[in-house]
Image: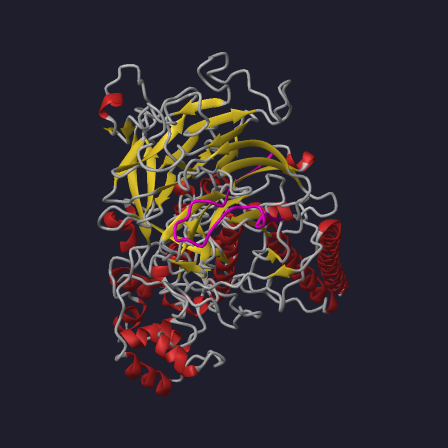
């Protein structure tokens, strides 16, 4: 019976990968004949039924969402579901088409149950209700109905099935006994059939929240954005409204990626001849940082941070300013480099490497402590020595120079300006090797958190930590590692006054933190406010959630969703182990860069984008309008390499209900319907009273049933008026034949009814117009737009009024003629009788 049900409910007549594969990709979709159906049933009995996933999903293979505005029709899903206002209107339009046909046929309208069934497209569990968890299964044409509900539907509304589907098996079954029909539309998992799905606390308690596995790990999915990169150390945007992404490789190349995913053949910047790097596994030197000036769109300035060695001298890190080419917006001017700052590096490791601009307009530079183990440089180490630039957060003003010849100025608000024992560039100190920092954009609505700088500081041998940088802050290294003491003597110094990290984890979890971003994007609302980061060595992704009342941060583990959870087109649920960096695009969406082999020369680097499979933003909300990018060279299209959960050739499922070809001519016989005094109640022959239970407050207030499409109202009004005009003309052709007309099916024409009046009178349509055969036309009048439609409606109204007036005049004239003729006859008879009386008297 399961196979029979599947074959009947799916438009293709098949319900498994095996059958679809056997048919071939080009096999036409046909509803099976009864012998073919029996064959399918016998084959399908051999296919095991897969358990349903607890993950909500829409019919377009995307997560549910909260609509931007309330829904007028399927109002029960306006807080969370799969329909926006456009889809809601389309469902309403189909619904009213069916109601109209039911009125013509004289059937019970079944308004409530019909609406409930059609609105399951909007349910956040639509994929389960329609067996659409993956694109390999054809979608059902009817949602899964629980047996008790289905029994009621079959008893009252089985005649509605022909308007919901063209599937012959379903149509035949709907005319048979209730058990056969309901066993077909039922679901194997009773938790997901309607209306049980609304009553399950397990399903609805966390609806729309990030899916968690039994261990509490947040299940996210990924999309592949770029690949074939040599240790991609950073990805950033230029904040110029072009939405380009710039990806830098450790070897010194910076590539431009366009909005469509393609990469420009020529690099934006080639520093491979200057950058010091090696193919050694895990070498920390190379091209490490880059930042675009906040006014890059106007001045074309950007800054880079890289390792350099000249003439076998001591290695250095160099921070330079460069400009974009005056002739090509996608290429830097290779001759524009101006060195801003150089710092000697005593060792090959702990090179730092982050550059970023704060919202204050100043450039922040994050340096390592110089390398080796335990910061052994000097009595206190470089990090605690404020006169050294290593192990620091530096802040400089790059929009000017000072009198000493430096190509930058010291911001007057720097904390150690005027301190003879400190460099004025120092903004914060006591850091070991901060790898990847970011600026929080702030909450999109409240702006909470805007401007905070988060950093991941790589630990020594026990702890990794996450810090929020504050002005003048001491972050403890080498006195402390994480929350614990590293150098006991320095740790017990009362003057340490260090700032504790917001989070630290031991080396049982990971051994090299990679700082991330606070998610402030649009596409995944559930992630808003989460600080997402990772670990380079363990490949683990983690998140921190802030308690705004206490200021504490709670860890939230992140893992990849299972196959069912990530069953969306183009999504993957795996990534390379070595997480090098995180990134944020111009719209605020979050990415990370990882490689399978951490060598600067290995082309295994890939960029992944986060996606929450539990909830998305409503369609249209996150649309961007990037400025055009003038491309002079060749574009290389993006070719994904990672294996997706679904085949990339599979297309998303389309909503199952399609536009039914409704009858254009009313049936010859109809059952009589007695109108009632209320618009909300309809009584039919042999049927109980049906009460409209609309949840639409506006509809209740206006007492109307059909307010959804103004164009449709005007078209229906025009149809009625044309029918009345035609009827009037027929009367004028044969004026001498006057026959009594039966009350059955008769409706008095309203000659003064306008489009607005008709819109208001739809509420009484069910009770007063169910038997009106005269107002139906053989085909719908095509709709017009704008003033032409209004003029046509007005002309039709005038013509209708004129025809009605002519008809009334003719009727009055006919009555007058009859009266005159009758009077003449009576007068003649009286004259004859009077004459006879006079003759008799004379005799």
Image height check: is 11 above or below 343?
A: below
Verify whether residue 271 appears in magenta.
yes
Q: Is residue 86 visible?
A: yes
Image height check: is 371 above or below 383?
A: below
The type of colouring in the image is secondary structure
Q: Which residue is nearer to you in this view: 366 or 335?
A: 335
Determine the residue located farthest toward the bottom in the rendered image: 35
Residue 539 placed where, x, y %?
33, 50
Q: Which residue is nearer to you in this view: 678 or 174?
A: 174
Q: Is residue 239 left or right of residue 831?
A: left
Q: Which residue is nearer to you in this view: 265 or 288?
A: 288
Magenta part of the chain: 269-293
Q: Is residue 612 visible?
A: no
Give the residue at x 69% y 57%: 633
The quarter of the picture where the C terminus appears is: bottom right
Q: Is residue 50 left or right of residue 271?
A: left
Residue 301 placed where, x, y %?
64, 36
Residue 2 placed where, x, y %?
27, 73
Q: Which residue is nearer to you in this view: 592 or 16?
A: 592
Q: Is residue 407 left or right of residue 522?
A: right
Verify whether residue 178 appears in magenta.
no
Image height check: is 347 above or below 96?
A: above
The quarter of the picture where the N terminus appears is: bottom left
Residue 195 placed where, x, y %?
30, 55
* Total numbered labels placed on residues in the image: 0
Q: Main secondary structure of the magenta part?
A: loop
């Amino acid at each position: 019976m399961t196979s029979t049900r599947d074959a009947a409910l799916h438009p293709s007549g098949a319900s498994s990968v095996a059958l679809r594969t056997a048919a071939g990709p080009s096999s036409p979709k046909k509803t099976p004949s009864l012998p073919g159906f029996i064959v399918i049933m016998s084959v399908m009995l051999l296919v095991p039924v897969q358990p349903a996933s607890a993950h909500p999903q829409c019919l377009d293979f995307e997560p549910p969402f909260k609509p931007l505005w309330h829904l007028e029709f399927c109002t029960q899903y306006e807080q969370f579901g799969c329909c926006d206002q456009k889809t809601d209107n389309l469902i309403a339009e189909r619904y009213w088409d069916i109601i109209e046909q039911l009125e013509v046929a004289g059937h019970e309208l079944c308004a409530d149950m019909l609406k409930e069934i059609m609105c399951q497209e909007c349910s956040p569990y639509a994929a389960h209700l329609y067996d659409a968890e993956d694109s390999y299964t054809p979608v059902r044409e009817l949602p899964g109905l629980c047996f008790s509900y289905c029994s009621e539907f079959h008893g009252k509304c089985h005649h509605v099935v022909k308007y919901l589907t063209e599937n012959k098996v379903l149509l035949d079954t709907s005319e048979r006994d209730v058990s056969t029909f309901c066993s077909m539309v039922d679901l194997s998992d009773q938790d997901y059939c309607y209306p049980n799905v609304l009553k399950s606390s397990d399903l609805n308690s966390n609806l729309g929240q990030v899916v968690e596995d039994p261990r509490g790990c947040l299940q996210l999915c990924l999309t592949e954005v770029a690949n074939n990169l040599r240790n991609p150390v950073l990805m950033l945007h230029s904040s110029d409204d072009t939405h380009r992404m710039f990806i830098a490789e450790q070897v010194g190349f910076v590539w431009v990626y366009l909005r469509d995913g393609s990469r420009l053949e020529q690099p934006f910047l080639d520093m491979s001849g200057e950058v010091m790097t090696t193919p050694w596994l895990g070498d920390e030197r190379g091209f490490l940082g880059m930042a675009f000036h906040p006014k890059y769109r106007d001045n074309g300035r950007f800054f880079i941070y890289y390792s350099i060695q000249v003439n076998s001298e001591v290695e250095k890190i160099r921070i330079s300013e460069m400009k974009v080419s005056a002739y090509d917006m996608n290429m830097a001017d290779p001759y524009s480099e101006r060195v801003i700052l150089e710092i000697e590096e005593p060792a090959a490791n702990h090179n730092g490497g982050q550059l970023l601009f704060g919202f204050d307009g100043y450039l922040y530079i994050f340096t390592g402590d110089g390398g080796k183990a335990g910061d052994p440089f000097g009595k206190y180490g470089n990090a605690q020595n404020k006169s050294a630039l290593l192990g620091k957060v530096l802040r400089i003003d790059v929009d000017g120079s000072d009198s000493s010849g430096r190509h930058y100025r010291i911001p007057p608000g720097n904390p150690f300006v005027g301190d003879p024992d400190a460099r004025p560039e120092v903004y914060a100190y006591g850091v070991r090797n901060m790898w990847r920092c970011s600026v929080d954009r702030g909450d999109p609505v409240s702006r909470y958190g805007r401007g905070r700088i988060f950093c991941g500081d790589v630990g020594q041998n026990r702890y990794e930590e996450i810090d929020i940088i504050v002005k003048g802050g001491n972050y403890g290294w080498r006195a402390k590692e994480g929350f614990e003491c590293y150098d006991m003597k320095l740790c017990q110094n009362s003057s340490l006054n260090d700032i504790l990290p917001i989070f630290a984890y031991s080396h049982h979890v990971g051994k090299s933190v990679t700082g991330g971003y606070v998610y402030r994007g649009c596409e995944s609302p559930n992630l808003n406010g989460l600080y997402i980061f990772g670990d380079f060595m363990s490949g683990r992704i983690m998140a921190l959630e802030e308690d705004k009342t206490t200021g504490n941060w709670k860890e939230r583990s992140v893992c990849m969703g299972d196959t069912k959870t990530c069953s969306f087109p183009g999504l993957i649920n795996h990534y390379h182990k070595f997480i090098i960096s995180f990134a944020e695009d111009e719209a605020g969406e979050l990415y990370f860069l990882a490689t399978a082999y951490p060598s600067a020369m290995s082309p295994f680097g890939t960029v992944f984008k986060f996606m929450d499979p539990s909830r998305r933003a409503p369609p249209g909300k996150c649309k961007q309008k990037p400025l055009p990018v003038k491309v002079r060279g060749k574009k290389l299209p993006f070719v994904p390499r990672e294996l997706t959960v679904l085949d990339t050739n599979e297309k998303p499922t389309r909503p199952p209900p399609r536009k039914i070809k409704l009858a254009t001519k009313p049936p010859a016989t109809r059952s009589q319907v007695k109108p009632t005094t209320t618009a909300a109640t309809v009584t039919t022959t042999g049927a109980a009273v049906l009460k409209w239970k609309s949840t639409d407050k506006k509809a209740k207030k206006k007492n109307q049933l059909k307010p959804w499409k103004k164009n449709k109202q005007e078209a229906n009004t025009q149809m009625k008026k044309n029918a009345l005009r035609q009827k009037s003309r027929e009367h004028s052709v044969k004026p001498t034949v006057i026959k009594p007309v039966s009350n059955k099916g008769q409706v008095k024409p309203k000659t003064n009814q306008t489009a607005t009046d008709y819109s208001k009178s739809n509420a009484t349509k069910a009770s007063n117009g169910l038997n009106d055969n005269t107002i139906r036309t053989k085909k719908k009048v095509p709709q017009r737009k704008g003033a032409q439609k209004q003029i046509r409606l007005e002309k039709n109204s005038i013509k209708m009024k004129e025809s009605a007036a002519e008809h009334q005049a003719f009727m009055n004239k006919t009555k007058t003629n009859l009266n005159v003729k009758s009077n003449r006859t009576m007068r003649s008879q009286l004259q004859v009788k009077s004459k006879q009386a006079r003759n008799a008297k004379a005799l």
